[in-house]
Image (tube, grey):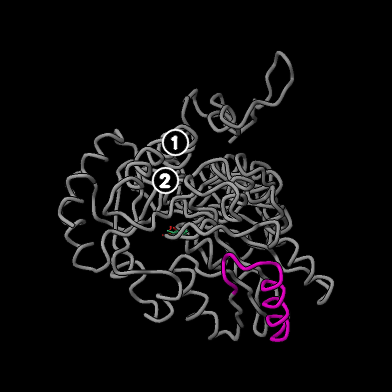
Amino acid sequence: MGSQHDKSSRTGRRHSARTRLIHEGYDASAHSGAVKAPIYHSSTFLFDSAEDGAAFFRVNNKVALPDDPDQAGLIYSRFSTPNVDLLEKRLAILDGGDRALAFASGMAAIATTLMAFVSAGDVILYTAPLYGGTDAFLNRVLPRQDIRLTAVAAEADEGAFRAAADSAMKKGPVRVLYTETPTNPHNEIVDLGLCRRIADYMETVQGVAPVVVCDNTLLGPVGQQPLNHGVDLVIYSLTKYVGGHSDLLAGAVIGRRDLIDAVYGQRSFLGGVIDPHTAWLLTRSLETVTLRMKAACDSASRVAAFLNRHPKVSRLNYPGLLASNSRRGRLHRQQSSLDGSTFSFDVGTDREAAFRFLDALQLIKLAVSLGGTESLILHPVSTSHSNIDPARREALGFTEGMVRLSVGLEDPDDLIDDLEQALANV
Ligand SMILES: *Cc1c(COP(=O)(O)O)cnc(C)c1O
């Protein structure tokens, strides 16, 4: 979308991330002076000449992301559009990646990324639990393509992780080490540095390291930057905190140029690119993501402190209350700068008590998803995690009394009042 002004003219210093999220990659003079980027609702783009079209295809046939999309040329909106290009430039900023790719959903980002790196006979080593959709894609879809799997517990120590890596390598070449931290809804913490060491260990055995992929949806790019802890690719459901208003569906993958190129080629074939209008909404969301996430996390800490004191609440899984001398607490503070605003807790011990509590809430809404301006709550065992085998679900720490709360941007005192009156029904 034209030239960019991403350096201060006075000092030559690069502007900070929050400034770049508002200005980078957009030149109003190339768009009739429009202060905000127009939306390009066009599925195809003109070539200036036959030779121009041929030149664009010479670049695109390499199935690599063009260095400068303005010069490599726009061809067809399944590859990119000006709105997608602008969003991708800005998405890479907070995570410090070379490049970003945006998708029509988080699951499109996850499926496309995995399919870019694995073929029949390859193995994926993953930490459990993962987001339900990811778990289902791994365990139900990929085995049909003869992709093999090994799971390791999210908080496995070095010895257990190494044993899982050895057992995975016996099944075939391990191409991907896939993780998600904190886990949802228990807020277990995966040691990302350990994931890197395990990937490096596998390189010494099998010759190539697996690509280390981390789903960072829960703390978002404001609360945690996995690329700084040895991860190769970061994945998002932008539907959650980054979009932040529960009004769109989108995903992203961010990281090193050569890996992003491989995913870009796959995206062009599978067709899961984000549409221009949703990309435009997300460039708007990115302007406030830092403010929104900090505010939601501040409110969540007030709400968690209230729940922590309440006699009817047990097993509160909130990272901000982890003891700093525990392994989990130490790791959390080392890897993350925010405590998040999505966490779980138990109200009573059975489903009836949990349902009485949920049905008595007036302000906090009962719905799946998280990270929006409005606070949402759900009962994982009967909804988001209902299709997991009950024995496996119990082993993963799910109980009938557990609820998951995503704290939004309402006044925390109003949320606490609502929780208090609803807890009286337990
Ligand atoms: C919601 C979610 C996804 C899936 O994203 P969609 O945008 O719903 O496709 C993946 N990972 C995590 C952690 C999520 O919360």
Q: Main secondary structure of the magenta part?
A: helix
| Mark 2, secondary structure of its residue | loop
Three-letter code for the amino acid on which mark 1 is drawn: Arg
Task: Please give the range of residues in magenta.
Answer: 152-172
Image position, residue 211 (x, y; %): 70, 65
Residue at mark 2:
341
Mark 1–mark 2 Cα distance, whole angstroms, equals 21 Å
Above or below, 170 against 315 in this view is: below
Tell me if 128 is positioned left or right of 248 in this view.
right
**Which residue ends up furthest to the front in the rendered image?**
311
Q: Quadrant of residue 190?
A: bottom right
- Percent across and percent down for residue 89 are 60, 41
- Report crowding for label 1: few under 14, some 14 to 19, many 20 or more residues within 10 A (C-alpha): some
Looking at numbered disc 2 in the image, what kind of residue is underneath it?
A: Ser
Q: Which residue is mark 1?
A: 284
Q: Is 416 situated above or below 250? A: above
Residue 246 in magenta stretch: no
Foreground of the two, 328 or 269? 328
